C-alpha cells in the first residue's frame, strides 16, 4: 500500500503537514519506522498589539521584576513551583535524562473495540506515516485493525511528556479532498488522549444529576424523531466554513479599500423553551423544504377544472 498524505499543493503541504515526531511503532515483536505529521491546523484572523501613537508592533520581553532589567537567554533557567514563590531549578540535561524509553518508541499496549472510546478523550490528531522500510508492516497492521474493527492504545513521549494515544484506521484522503485523484485512501490516524486525571468529569460541575432522567412523553419523542430524520444527511464538512473569520476578512478588506463595512446579521435573541411540543412543531415546519422544491411525486395535486366547465362532482350535486 502506497500512502499519500492529503494536502493542497506543495506549499500548503509543507505548512500543514509538518513532521512533529519520528521513531518506531511496535505491536508485539513487529517494529516499523514511522513519523507523525500534524493532522490539522486551525485558521483564524490574528491581530498584533501596536502602539497607538506610531503604530509600531509591541514586543514581549523577559523582564526581571526585581531590577526591571531584560534577562538574556543564557541566564534563563527552568524552575518548578513546588510552593508559592519557591522554585526547584532543573537543568536541560536533567530534563532530557528524565525522558522514558518511549521517547523514540510508540508502543501499542492494548487493542480494544472502536466503539469503546468516547471522543471526549481525544486531544490532538496526527497522521501516522510509515517510512519506506515499514510499508509492509504498516499495511499488515492497518488491514488487521480494519477487519477486526479495533483501535490500539499506545504510549510514547513527545514535548517533555509521555502521552497516551489511540491509533485507528481511517480514510486519510476522503473523496472531497483536493489531493490526488479523489478516490479514498486508507491509513492510520493517531489521536492524543487525555489521561484520566486530566479529563474534567461532568459530575464535578454539579450540573448533572445522578438520577436517571424521566422518560419523555411519547408525542414529544415522535416529533423529536421526525425532526432528526428531517435533518439527517451525509457527513460533508466541506459545506461548512468559519463565518467569524469570513466576516473579519470582509471587514478588513473593506477598510483597506476605504469602503463602508459590510452589513452583517446579528445573533438572534434566544430564550429558554417553555412549551417543548410547540417548539418541536415549529422546528419541523421550519425544516421542511419550500413548496417549489417539492418533487412531482411529493406534491401531486388534482388539476383545476378548465375555465367555464364545472367539475363532475359539482354537476351531480346540483342535479340531485
Image (tube, helix red, strand yellow):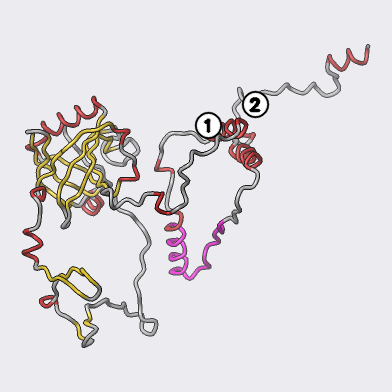
Q: Earlier in the sequence, mark 2 or mark 1?
A: 1
Q: CA distance from mark 2 to mark 1?
A: 19 Å
Q: Residue furthest front?
A: 211
Q: Position of residue 197 (x, y in %)?
A: 28, 51
Q: Position of residue 236 (x, y in %)?
A: 41, 39
- Which residue is drawn at the image coordinates 6% and 64% (left, top)? 93
Where, by quadrant of the figure, is residue 94 drawn? bottom left
Q: Position of residue 285 (x, y in %)?
A: 63, 38
Where, by quadrant of the figure, is residue 302 drawn? top right
How many labels sit on residues? 2
Looking at the rendering, in which quadrant would you find the C terminus?
A: top right
Q: Residue furthest bottom?
A: 67
Question: Left or right: 318 with respect to 83?
Answer: right
Report crowding for label 1: few under 14, some 14 to 19, many 20 or more residues within 10 A (C-alpha): few
Q: Secondary structure at mark 2?
A: loop
- Which residue is drawn at the image coordinates 70% and 23% (left, top)? 301
Q: Is residue 55 above or below residue 307?
A: below
Q: Nearer the viewer, residue 44 or 95?
A: 95
Checking the image for residue 299, the label placed there is 2
- Which residue is drawn at the image coordinates 26% and 28% (left, top)? 149
Question: Left or right: 149 with respect to 289?
Answer: left
Q: Between tags 2 and 1, which lies in front?
A: 1
Q: Which residue is mark 1?
A: 229
Q: Nearer the viewer, residue 150 or 201?
A: 201
- Which residue is drawn at the image coordinates 21% and 82% (left, top)? 64
Q: Secondary structure at mark 1?
A: helix
Q: Position of residue 75 (x, y in %)?
A: 12, 78
Is 65 in the magenta?
no
Amino acid at each position: 500500500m502506497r500512502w499519500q498524505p492529503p494536502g493542497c499543493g506543495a506549499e500548503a503541504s509543507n505548512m500543514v503537514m509538518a513532521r512533529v515526531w519520528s521513531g518506531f511503532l511496535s505491536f508485539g515483536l513487529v517494529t516499523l519506522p514511522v513519523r507523525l505529521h500534524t493532522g490539522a491546523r486551525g485558521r483564524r484572523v490574528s491581530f498584533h498589539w501596536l502602539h497607538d501613537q506610531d503604530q509600531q508592533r509591541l514586543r514581549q520581553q523577559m523582564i526581571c521584576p526585581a531590577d526591571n532589567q531584560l534577562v538574556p537567554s543564557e541566564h534563563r533557567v527552568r524552575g518548578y513551583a513546588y510552593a508559592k514563590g519557591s522554585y526547584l531549578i532543573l537543568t536541560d540535561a536533567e530534563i532530557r535524562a528524565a525522558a522514558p524509553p518511549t521517547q523514540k518508541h510508540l508502543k501499542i499496549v492494548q487493542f480494544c473495540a472502536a466503539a469503546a472510546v468516547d471522543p471526549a478523550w481525544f486531544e490532538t490528531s496526527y497522521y501516522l506515516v510509515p517510512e519506506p522500510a515499514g510499508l509492509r508492516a504498516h499495511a499488515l497492521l492497518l488491514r488487521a485493525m480494519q477487519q477486526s474493527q479495533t483501535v490500539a492504545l499506545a504510549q510514547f513521549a513527545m514535548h517533555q511528556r509521555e502521552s497516551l494515544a489511540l491509533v485507528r484506521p481511517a480514510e486519510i484522503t476522503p473523496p472531497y479532498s483536493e489531493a490526488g485523484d479523489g478516490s479514498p485512501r486508507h491509513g492510520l490516524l493517531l489521536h492524543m488522549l487525555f489521561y484520566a486525571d486530566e479529563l474534567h468529569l461532568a459530575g464535578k460541575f454539579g450540573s448533572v444529576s445522578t438520577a436517571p432522567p424521566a422518560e419523555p412523553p411519547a408525542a414529544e419523542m415522535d416529533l423529536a424523531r421526525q425532526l432528526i430524520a428531517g435533518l439527517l444527511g451525509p457527513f460533508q464538512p466541506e459545506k461548512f466554513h468559519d463565518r467569524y473569520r469570513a466576516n473579519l476578512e470582509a471587514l478588513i478588506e473593506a477598510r483597506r479599500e476605504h469602503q463602508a463595512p459590510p452589513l452583517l446579521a446579528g445573533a438572534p435573541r434566544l430564550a429558554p423553551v417553555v412549551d417543548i411540543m410547540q417548539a418541536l412543531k415549529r422546528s419541523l415546519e421550519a425544516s421542511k423544504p419550500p413548496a417549489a422544491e417539492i418533487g412531482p411525486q411529493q406534491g401531486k395535486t388534482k388539476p383545476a377544472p378548465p375555465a367555464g366547465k364545472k367539475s363532475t362532482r359539482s354537476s351531480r350535486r346540483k342535479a340531485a
